[in-house]
Amino acid sequence: MSLAAEPGTHKPLDIIESNEQLLATRKAHFPPTAVHYYQKPLHLVRAKGCNVYDEQGREYLDVIGGIVCISAGHNHPKIQQRMLAMIQNDEIQHTTTLYLNRYATRLAEKLAQAAPAGIDKVAFTNSGSEANEVALMAARHATGETTVMSLQHGYHGGTLGTLAHCGHASWRFKAQPVAHTVAALAPNCYRCPFKQEPTTCHLECATHVEETIQTTTHGKLAAFIAEPVMGVGGFITPPEAYFHQVAKIVKKYGAKYISDEVQTGAGRCGEAFLATKSMQIDADIITMAKGFGNGAAAGATLMRDEIAASLSGKFHFNTFAGDPFQAMQALTTMEIIEDEQLIENARAMGEYLIEQLKALQSRHPLIGDVRGRGLLIGVELVKDRITKDYATAETNQLMELTQERGVLIGKGGLFGNVVRIAPALSISRTQCDQLVQALDESLTVIEKSNA
Ligand SMILES: Cc1ncc(COP(=O)(O)O)c(C=O)c1O
C-alpha cells in the first residue's frame, strides 16, 4: 500500500522543502562527521510497519530501521494511540527520576523480569552510549579497578568513555580519555585471526583473551565489554561457547562482564528478549537502546544487585532518562513484542532469510559469508572468495541498486563491505522475498558490470 495519496493533515512549521536546499543547508551547518547513505541522500518523511516513504511518496522496504532501531515496526498503532492519549490527557510531558513515574517504574520491573536471574536493577539513559558509560562507571566503581577490556572491531558508542573501547579507527578521534584500555582480537569465524576453521578450532580467540590480560594489564580488570553479535563490526557472530569461556576467564581476573545488547536486545536475535539470557552469557551488566525504544531515545543499563549496591551513597542523574514518553514507548514495545509473538517471528524469518541468502551465495561469487542471529543478518561481500579482499565499492553499488529497487539495506564492517539486514521484527515472508529479489537482481548487475 502506498501512502503517497494521503498527505499529512498538518503542515510543519517553517521547514526547508527541496532536497537540494536541505542538502546545502545541512552541509553549511552540520559538521563533516555527519555522513549520509546514498549518493543522492534520501529524504524519508513517513513510515508504517516495515515501510518508509520519501518526500515524493515513493515506498521502500526498510530492512535497517534507522540503524537497527525499529523492532515493533514504524508507527505501530498501539504506540501511536498511547502517545496521542498522553498528549490529549495533558499527561506530564517531562519529569525526572526525582519524582515518581509509573511508566519508568513499570518498565524497570518488566526489564528485570526479562533479564537473567540476579540482574534486577535498571538505570535509564537516552542512548546506547550513555547506557555503556553507566555500565563502565559502575564496573569501575564496584571493582575499584580501571582497566577495561573490549574487542577489536567492537563498537559501544560515541562518547569519550565508550570511544576508548571502539575497535574502528574511523570512529575514533585524537582526543582519548585517560583510562587504561586493552582490546582482544575479534572472534570472527569468517576471518579467523588464528587461521582456524569453526568446526575444528579450539576457541583460540578465547584463550587469547587470557593471554592479553596476562601480558597487557597488571593482572586485574574492571570490566570486559562485548556485544553478543558485533553490530558495527559487520554482524560478526561468534559461537556461544566463546562467550562462556571468556566470561570465566575475565571473571578470574576480577572483571564485571558487560554484555552490550544495544543492537542484539529487544528480541532481535529471535531467541529471548535478551540474547545474553538465551545464550546463557554470565553477564553482570547488560546495556540496551535502539530497538528497545522502537526508535524513541531510550536506553537502559541493567545490573546485578551487588553492583548497584556498591554505588550507594553517590548521586547519578540524567535529566531525560526515564522520561514518560520514552518509557511509555519502550514499555509498549515490550508489550507488542510479547503480544504479537515477534521473537518467534524474528526467529522464523531470520532462518528463512539465512536460507534464501545462502542460496544467493551459491549463485553470486561476491557473497563471501552469510551470518547472524534472528533478524540481525550480515552478508559479507568479497572480491575473491580465496583472498577475501573487501568488496567495499561493490557494497556501495549494492546500496544504490537496491535503493533503486525500493529496498533500503544497511552496511557495516571496518571496510564497509558487510550488508546489514535488521528489519522490524514483524517482517513478513513476502517482504523477505522482496529483499532477496532486490539483492539478487542488484548483485547480477554488479557482477555483469565487473565481468
Ligand atoms: C552495540 C552498540 N552499543 C552502543 C551503541 C551506541 O548507541 P547510541 O548511538 O544510541 O549512543 C551502538 C550504536 O550503534 C551500538 O551498536
Image: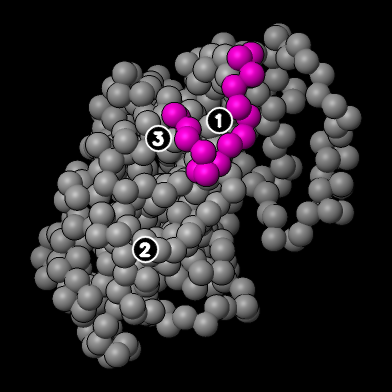
Tell me which label, 3 or 1, sits earlier in the chain.
Answer: 3
**Residue kind at label 1, given as amino acid type:** Phe
The magenta region covers 87-103
Name the residue tied to disc 1: 325
- The residue sitting at 30% across, 24% down in the picture is 338
Q: Is residue 339 visible?
A: yes
Of 416 and 155, which appears nearest the observer?
Answer: 155
Q: Residue lying furthest top in this view?
A: 5
Query: Under tag 3, what secondary structure?
Result: helix
When asked about the image quadrant of residue 44, the answer is top right
In the rendered image, residue 443, in percent from the top left (x then y), is placed at: 49, 42
Q: From what the image shows, is residue 427 above or below residue 146?
A: above
1 or 2: tag closer to the N-terminus: 2
**What residue occupies the far front of the structure in this picture?**
313
The residue at which mark 3 appears reads as 105
Q: Quadrant of residue 206?
A: bottom left
Question: Where residue 67 appears, x then y in whole percent?
Answer: 52, 44
Structural crowding at the residue carrying mark 1, measured as other residues with C-alpha within 10 Å and reported as few (<14), some (14–19) or many (≥20): many
Asked whether, in this view, residue 6 is left or right of residue 435, the answer is right
Mark 1 vs mark 2, foreground winner is: 2
Which quadrant, please, contains the N terminus? top right
